[in-house]
Image: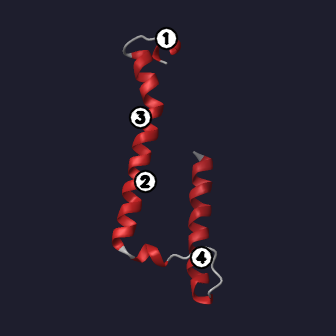
Amino acid sequence: MGVLLVGVVFLAAFVLLQLRLQKTESALLNLKPFTYTQYTRALLMMLLMMIALFGALILLPLFLQQVYGLTPCAQG
C-alpha cells in the first residue's frame, strides 16, 4: 500500500510541475488534449476497461480453483 501511495504522490507532483511548465513552453508532456472532454472521457473509459480486464485475468484462475476445484494444470 505504501508503494501505491508513493506512486500517486509522485504522479501528482509530476502533473503539477507540468502544469506550471506549460506556461514556459518547456514541458515534457503537452496537457492541452486533456481539455477536450470527449478525449478525457475516452481515456477514462479505456482505463476502466483495462482495470476490469486485468482484474478478470487475476481473479478467474482463483475462481476456477476454489469454486470448481480445478487444479492449476486443469484450468490451463
Report x, y in % for residue 32. 48, 79
The answer to whether residue 11 is above or below residue 74 is below
Q: Mark 1 points at which residue?
A: 71
At mark 1, the secondary structure is loop
Residue in front for this viewpoint, 11 or 30: 30
Mark 3 or mark 1: whose residue is earlier in sequence: 3
The amino acid sitting under disc 4 is Gln
Q: Sequence order check: which comes first, mark 2 or mark 1?
A: 2
* Residue shown at the point (61%, 76%) measured from the top left: 17
Res 22 quadrant in image: bottom right
Q: Give the amino acid type for the residue marked by disc 3 in the picture.
A: Ala
* Cα gap from disc 3 to disc 2, whole angstroms: 14 Å
Question: What is the CA distance from the residue labelled 3 to the residue labelled 4?
Answer: 34 Å
Q: Is mark 4 on a helix, strand or loop?
A: helix
- Residue farthest to the bottom? 24
Circle nearer the N terminus (4, 1): 4
Q: Residues within 10 Å of mark 4 (few under 14, many from 20)?
A: some
Residue that mark 4 sits on: 18
